[in-house]
Every structure is written in structure tokens, then in C-alpha cells.
Image (cartoon, grey):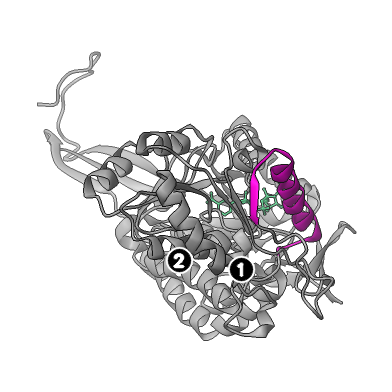
Amino acid sequence: MEELSHWIDGARVAGKSGRFADVYNPAIGEVQARVPLASKDEMDDAVARAAKAQRAWGATNPQKRARVMMEAVRLINRDMDKLAEKLSSEHGKTFVDAKGDVQRGLEVIEFCIGAPHLLKGEFTDSAGPGIDMYSMRQPLGVVAGITPFNFPAMIPLWKMGPALAGGNAMILKPSERDPSVPLMLAEIFQEAGLPDGVLQVVNGDKDAVDAILDSPVIQAVGFVGSTPIAHYIYHRAAETGKRAQCFGGAKNHMIIMPDADMDQAADALVGAGYGAAGERCMAISVAVPVGEGTAEALRERLVPKIEALKVGPYTAGDDVDYGPVVTQAAKENILRLVESGVAQGAELVVDGRGFKLQGYENGFFVGPHLFDHVKPEMDIYRTEIFGPVLSMVRAASYEEAIGLAMDHEYGNGTAIFTRDGDAARDFAHRINIGMVGINVPIPVPLAYHTFGGWKKSGFGDLNQHGPDAFKFYTRTKTVTSRWPSGIKEGAAFNFKAMD
Ligand code: NAD
């Protein structure tokens, strides 16, 4: 069995704590590697080393740092298949989807090539007599990224790119479920010219995370994961005065208006609901058809599409629609929630409970499920299931439909399917959710825009990637200077206008 490591000062370093987590191949349900779980001492040591390396990196000019990004783009493209293969084997998603995971992270590194422009300050000439005023964006020092299992390439890259291009050193604490790809990415960045110690990948669980949160050296924490942990990290990071942006879970609604193209809406729902086995924070998990006629038309189209979904291992080729979920515990949690839906009176229209795949009986596969007549008080509506389970909540009107999405505690993504521009515009304007799709089911913004949810889907300020990420991972200093120094005004005791 492979024994994974940390990545410290540009080399793979074995864990010293004696604690490990199993890393599975979810398609066969077998442990394929184990990953060390860092102790507080190991984390503190990695942070101290990062602080040392950051001094020279922070003083390196932005263009040179951007060139490292440029080379990393080339190398990630070179290793795309290798990265995607490893990613699929630990996460379970299909090979094509794994490539998409790498690709959407890569696009943020491409954006980071423009770091010199984003890091430019502002300048006011002659703000007063002989006085100039300018601001600069400076690195924070050592910052951290704590990332979830479901995008083991994309989200680490979203964190690493802006933090490193901004002149910081980064401690990356990836998910212990699929830690290999972040380690491979660290090697790639070293090959691209990143100095040793500037990126430390420290594997671990709560102990490692708590060591990050308590570290007086770490200045900012970018977290992505479930809402209870996001909330915990936000609180605890604030106690030690850190900057924190913590993105959490989701329950994304798609509203289908009576005038929508029903075939397009059904296709969108199947892809967005079941792709990656529903293990996406932007997955659609609630369909809200407006009117009984819409609900019937949609259901009629959805059922055969869902029943025809091909579930299998990533090794079975491109026609597999989705793979296993990440762990046996995740599978059991999904099936427990399905049982609660049945018990609480929802209609289980497509029942994936008995799903078995020949030759992969021990894999963590979950068949597709569709519930109809789901009510807002049911657990399957209130909880993020994070599996291949779509719930249909019938609404009598557009107002009722938008009200459902607005009242839900999560606010990550949402979509409306309609041909009515007025309804679409009203929806985009009024909805209290961070990312909105209009006839687009998974509205993940591109690298040069920003990504972030509202309500319990995101704590803190500023979003991920785009210009916000550079603001998050740098701080502004403003300088007021007077030249020539020969101007003599005498002592000034009062604030006054500069004139
Ligand atoms: P998770 O919260 O279990 O883990 C995320 C990270 O937190 C991991 O690195 C993990 O090691 C660490 N962690 C776990 N338990 C901890 C604890 N008790 N104390 C300190 N740290 C702890 O999330 P996950 O299961 O890996 O990922 C799935 C979740 O992430 C879903 O809720 C999904 O919606 C969410 N997610 C959100 C976004 C977003 O941008 N909003 C994006 C992707 C995933």
C-alpha cells in the first residue's frame, strides 16, 4: 500500500505523528494508500519554514512570480491525464469530469499570470503642496488554504494561485480523503520555479486545522467545506485576528417556469443533479416546477433520463455518467436521508436504493433517486444530501418558488429556466443567493469573475478567485509623502483641508 507524505521545503516528507487516515479507491471500496495526519508540532515547523521562505518570495518582483504561474500552466497541461487519473482513483468521479476539475483550477492559474496588474497600487500626484499619496498591495506573509474532498485539484489551485502570485507563502491542508493530487501539484509548482518552502502541503485532520487556526504566524485562512466546519473555522480564526473566508454547503434550487423549454430543463437537471454523483457544491438538488402542468411535463421527461443514467467506475470509459461517492460513510448518510424522505411522506419516484454493480459490489456506488412532492419541512429538503438525489418541490406560483429559494438557509447557487426576460431579470435581481444561472444550471463563474455563496454558504468577506482573491491575500498600505523636504510649515496641531 502506498504511504503518502507531506510536502515541506520542496520535498516529500514522511509524517511523524504516527497517525494516518486511509485513502480509498471508492470504486472498489478498498484502501489504496494512507496519508499522515500532522501533529501541531509538525504544522508549527512547516509554518516557521514557510515564514522564512516567504521573505525572499515576497520581495521577488510580481512579474517573476507571474512567470512561475505561466510555467505551471504549461506543466499542468502536460500532466493533465496523469492528474485526472489519480484524481478519479481517489475521488471516484469520471475521468472526463476529473479533467474538468483540473481545468477549472488551471484557469485560475492562467488568471494569476496577470498578477502584476492586479497588485498595482494607486497614486495621487500633488494631493497637497509637494505631497503625493500612494497605496500598495503587500503580501500578508504566511496564509493557509483548507480544502474539501470534492474538487481536489480545482479548489487547492484556487487558493494557491492568488496567494502565491500575491507574494505569500501558503500552507495547504487538503482533504485527507484524496490528498495525492495536491501533492502532485506542489511538485509541479516546484518544477515551474517556485522556491522551496513557499508552498507547504501539510496533510491532516482537525489537529492540523486547529494548529493553523491557533498559529500566530498565519495571517489568513481560506476555507472550503461543509457549513458547520466553515462556521467553526470562521469563529476560531477571528479569535486570533486572522482574515478568514469560509465557504460552506449548499442546497441549490432550480426554478422551472411554465414557458421553459422542458427538454432543455430536464437535460439540465439530470446533468446538474447527478453529475459527480451530486457531490458538487453547485449541484442542483431541488427542482421547483411552477404549476402542476409544468411539474407533470418535467417529471415525464425526467424519469426516463434518470433511469437511463449509467453509473460505474472511471475505468469503464466515457459513457459513464457518474461514479461512486467518496466513502462508505457518505453512502450510508445518503441512504439514511433517502429513508427519511420516504418516512416523512415524499414520493420516491426513482428508487436507487437497491443499486448494485456487478464486479464492484464493495464500491461506494449509490443509484440515482428522484423524489416528488417534497415539502419544505422534510429533512431531505432542509439538509445538504451531497449525493445523487434530486427533490422536486411543486410551487403554485413564481412568487412561491422564489420564496422557497430565498427562505432556505443556504445561498450558494440557483437557476431559473424560462423564456420570459422579465421573470429572469426579476429573479436575478431579487434572489438572495451568490451565483445565479438563467437557463444555465450550474452557474460557476469563470476565473476572472468571483465565486462565493451567501447566507450559510459563505462566512467572511470577499469571494474566491477573480480580483477578490488578490484583495483577500494581500493588504493595502497607503503612503503620504512630501517633497521637497525643504517646505517649512511649522508644527500643525489641527486637521485641515489640504490646499
Ligand atoms: P468537510 O467540511 O468535511 O472538510 C473540509 C475540510 O475541513 C477538510 O480539509 C477537512 O480535513 C477539514 N475538517 C473536517 N472536519 C473538521 C473538523 N472537525 N475540524 C477542523 N477541520 C475539519 O467537507 P468535505 O466533506 O470535504 O466537502 C464537502 C462539503 O464542502 C460540502 O458541504 C460542499 O457543499 C462543500 N463545498 C463548498 C464549496 C463552496 O465553494 N461553497 C465548494 C466545494 C465544496
Corner quadrant of residue 60: bottom left
Instruction: Examine the rendered structure and indicate whether residue 483 appears above or below residue 391.
Output: above
Q: Nearer the viewer, residue 126 or 341?
A: 341
Label number found at residue 307:
1
Please name the residue shown 60% across and 79% down the image.
95
Q: Look at discs 1 and 2 and give the one toward the viewer.
A: 1
Q: Nearer the viewer, residue 180 or 311?
A: 311
Part of the protein shown in magenta? 325-349
- Give the x, y percent position of residue 414: 43, 48
Q: Is residue 175 magenta?
A: no
Q: Determine the main secondary structure of the stretch shown in magenta.
A: helix
Query: Does the rendering let one see residue 463?
Result: no
Please name the residue shown 57% across and 83% down the image.
318
Q: Which residue is mark 2?
A: 267
- Give the x, y percent position of residue 248: 57, 44
Q: Earlier in the sequence, mark 1 or mark 2?
A: 2
Number of other residues with Cα within 10 Å of mark 2, as a class: few under 14, some 14 to 19, many 20 or more: some
- Give the x, y percent position of residue 136: 33, 47
